[in-house]
Image (cartoon, rainbow, N blue to C red):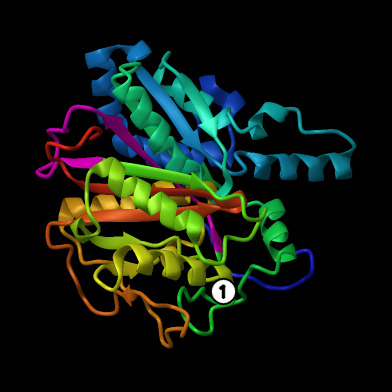
Amino acid sequence: SLNTGTPTIVGRVSEPLPEIPAHLSAFNTRNNQLALSALQQIEPSVRHAIATYGADRIAVVVGTSTSGIADGEIALAHKLEQGEFPSDYHYYKQELGNCSDFIARYFAISGPCYAISTACSSSGRVFITAKRMLNAGLVDAVIVGGADTLCRLTLNGFNGLEALSQRLCKPFDAQRDGINIGESAAFMLLGKTPSQQHAHAIALLGAGDSSDAHHISAPHPDGNGAEQAMRNALQDAKLTASDIGYINAHGTATPLNDSMESKAISRVFGQHVAVSSTKPLTGHTLGAASATEAAIAWHILQYQLPLPIQRCANKAPDIDITLVETTQYLENKAILSNSFAFGGNNISLIFGYVNDKASCN
């Protein structure tokens, strides 16, 4: 429960997480354990890239909202009870760059390494900065992604904004009343050469961003910044609205977000593209949300999976988009994924199969 005693639903990872290697014990946080669990799934590709290009030609860019602050909360509680911090605690564990530094040291990478923290668009912005580094020839491959774990600070902060739901979130529904916060980590290896490990080479076709700065915590009611980000992504990808077959919406299930995002999507795409939000499946994973939903897009493309269905019992009258309500498939089109953050920090990413326009794979 929250500080107010109010119950809320959270999406907590329940599977056992890997131990941090002994020589990296200074990085022993749940956030880094969650990151390592995801990184181990792409470790063979990362090791191959290091052997091919060299450790100094690989970059690490991580998006996170709170990094290891949950461990800081535990340490502070220990101090309040025992009068001192635990012997193994150091403030660096909760600094934003801790996860990116951990990854670089885990793989012994010496290329550019840093974190980006723009709230809920953090791990979407890493794709944009990685794309720029690759196109500029600064590096040959970039480990991109995000990690965020549950912490009381975030939960109580969103509760203070009256943004949490006490039930499973309902994006685009007339009864939507807030978000469920989750935790996750997702990572990819981005390069300019298509992977040979899979039947379908998948690319970051385009990326767009905007900063409407309408309000510190509320989106522009008409979705002007969201619209600009989507149009910028289409322009970057050299695609038209008709080339997009599915939109993974930011879809937080707050009244303001879903309304403005619907308006923005409708202006750019009309009723001709399928839309759904996957946050009822994962919770809103904050700084890791963009990367998590990019991974969902990758799996849809790689395995020709059906589009995520939106369980919307009563579509709200202010929602003027076509939701995925039955089994549908992508039909050889691209996927656009939205992430919109506090302060009007907006990101739209487009993923699809490799073509002559693709710049990052």
351 and 40: which is toward the camera: 351
Q: Position of residue 112 (x, y in %)?
A: 45, 18
Where's residue 146, x and y in %? 46, 41
Q: Name the residue: 78% across, 64% down.
A: 3
Quarter location, residue 79: top right
Region of the chain picked out in magenta, as a range = 181-204
Q: Residue furthest left?
A: 199
Q: Nearer the viewer, residue 88 or 67?
A: 67
- Quadrant in which the C terminus is drawn: top left
Whether residue 249 is in magenta: the answer is no
As for residue 190 lying within the magenta part, the answer is yes
The furthest residue to the bottom: 314
User: In the image, is residue 202 above or below residue 196?
Assistant: below
Instruction: Report the side of 83 relative to 61 (left or right).
Output: right
Q: Is residue 13 visible?
A: no
Q: Residue at x 36, y 69 (%)?
A: 266
Please give the residue where the numbered disc 1 appears in the rendered image.
255
Give the structural element (helix, strand or loop) at label 1: helix
Residue in front for this viewpoint, 52 or 257: 257
Q: x, y (%) of residue 279?
A: 45, 64
